[in-house]
């Protein structure tokens, strides 16, 4: 069961990291769109596009951080990480197909008595 917990920890770190990276790239893209619109003489449109893009990017990045935290907690065998990962796994069931697989794997692995004992020790 230790191997499953390690795999889950790395999966959550990778998927959360990808989400944070997408948020950062979206932020850069929104800034470029805003700058391009501003250079065209549409300062208001540039400010609006940049502001909305920045807001969306921050939301994406912030929503991805709990996955990174859960993955780190699983790798460090923190007791709180089990419940956080189960909640994130249940939420990811709605993200077909990869999230569904991650959610099923998370719930299967972390509801076993062995994993509960490992993470509560």
Image (spheres, rainbow, N blue to C red):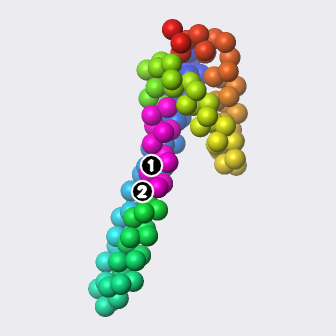
Q: Which of the numbered marks, if any, corresponds to residue 71?
A: none
- Helix, strand or loop for disc 1: helix
Quickly name the residue at label 2. 58
Quickly name the residue at label 1. 62
Label 1 with label 2: CB-CB less than 8 Å: yes
Q: Position of residue 49 (x, y in %)?
A: 41, 76
Q: Is residue 78 above or below residue 114?
A: below
Give the image quarter of residue 100: top right
One can see residue 26 in this view:
no
The residue located at (53%, 12%) in the rendering is 120
Residue 60 in the magenta stretch? The answer is yes
Q: Position of residue 42 (x, y in %)?
A: 35, 88
Q: Is residue 105 above or below residue 46?
A: above
The magenta region covers 58-70
The residue located at (59%, 10%) in the rendering is 117
Give the image quarter of residue 98: top right
Q: Magenta-highlighted stretch: main secondary structure? A: helix
């Amino acid at each position: 069961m230790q191997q499953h917990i390690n795999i889950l920890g790395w999966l959550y770190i990778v998927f959360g990291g990808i989400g944070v990276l997408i948020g950062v790239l979206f932020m850069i893209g929104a800034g470029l769109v805003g700058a391009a619109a501003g250079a065209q003489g549409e300062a208001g449109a540039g400010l609006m596009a940049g502001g909305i893009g920045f807001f969306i990017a921050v939301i994406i990045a912030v929503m991805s951080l709990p996955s990174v935290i859960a993955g780190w907690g699983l790798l460090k065998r923190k007791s709180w990480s089990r419940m956080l990962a189960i909640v994130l796994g249940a939420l990811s069931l709605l993200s077909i197909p990869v999230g569904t697989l991650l959610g099923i794997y998370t719930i299967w692995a972390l509801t076993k008595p062995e994993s509960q004992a490992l993470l509560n020790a």
